[in-house]
Amino acid sequence: MNDVLSVRSLRRNFEQGGVTIHVLRGIDLDIRKGEIVALLGPSGSGKSTLLQAVGLLEGGFEGSIRIGGEEAASLDNDGRTRLRRDALGFVYQFHHLLPDFTASENVVLPQLIHGAEPKAAAERAESLLSSLGLGQRLTHRPSQLSGGEQQRVAVARALANRPALVLADEPTGNLDEKTADVVFAEFLRLVRDEGSAALVATHNERIAAKMDRVLRLHEGVLE
Ligand code: ADP
Ligand code: MG
């Protein structure tokens, strides 16, 4: 089976002031090894809710989520944490880098948590950051980097443990248009070079058109 992700009949409701809103109404979704898929939809359509479900970050869902063939619903908390660490990488709209750590350390840390040797982790961090043009920024802290550079560090961090699937939620949504295009092109190139698959939430049609496939989230289903 070549699917890194297989989602079936995924549903999510929220209660808001005594009213039930049906955000995800039966999502079916498959992503193959190495495939880069856009999740397009206007603000409030449920893109982040879907990524949180697939990222095993939140409960409250009905349906099936299989990651690398493993059914998430049949795992306990430790199992979900392991699967998340082994198989997934995350990029958010705001980089969420650790402010007291250097660019390199931000990319090293998840590898150490994952059991890598410190030397190998540092080499991989340098290689990833260099391929994103940050070879001269390894010892800078996030506050010493531009917005585009910070987001590149977040991309390197997401790929550090060689995830089968990267989940990106509006990864360039906080950048000006020109920087967003450059950083997104680099993100695509690196994800492809690394052989990872990606599911990228965006409301930007232009960015979506650069991916292998575009899914539209409309009234709680994909079309
Ligand atoms: P998008 O990422 O596409 O902008 P979201 O997934 O953030 O959309 O939100 C989809 C809908 O779900 C919105 O109507 C939002 O208000 C609602 N929603 C999201 N998270 C919660 C929550 N924790 N509690 C209540 N409603 C929520
Ligand atoms: Mg969102």
Image (cartoon, grey):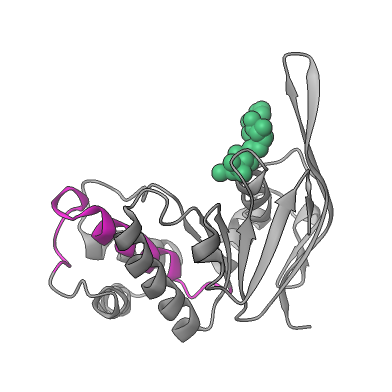
* Residue shown at 78% from the left, 45% from the top: 220
- State left or right for residue 168 relative to residue 11: left
Tell me residue 137's x, y (percent). 15, 67
Give the farthest residue toward the front: 206
Q: Is residue 77 magenta?
A: no
Residue drawn at (79%, 19%) of the image: 19
Q: In the visual, does 195 lie left or right of 184?
A: right
Residue 157 among those drawn in magenta: yes
Q: Which residues are magenta?
A: 137-164
Q: From where the camera sits, is residue 115 visible? A: no
**Percent x, y of residue 185:** 40, 73
Query: Residue 100: where, in percent of width, then height?
Result: 21, 47
In the picture shown, does residue 87 fall above or below 53? below
Q: Nearer the viewer, residue 31 or 42?
A: 42
Residue at (71% x, 41% y) in the render: 59
Disc tally is 0
- Give 180 or 9, whichever is nearer the viewer: 180
Could you tell me if residue 182 is visible in this image? yes
For ligand 2, which image quadrant applies?
Answer: top right
Nearer-the-camera pick, 161 or 49: 49
- Image coordinates for residue 127, horizontal then vertical, percent: 28, 81
Q: Quadrant of residue 85?
A: bottom right
Q: Is residue 74 left or right of residue 105?
A: right
Classify the position of the C terminus by image quarter. bottom right
| Corner quadrant of residue 157 | bottom left
62 to the left or right of 144: right
For the view shown, which residue lies furthest in the top direction?
Answer: 17
Residue at image x 60%, y 81%?
34
Q: Which quadrant is home to the N terminus?
A: bottom right
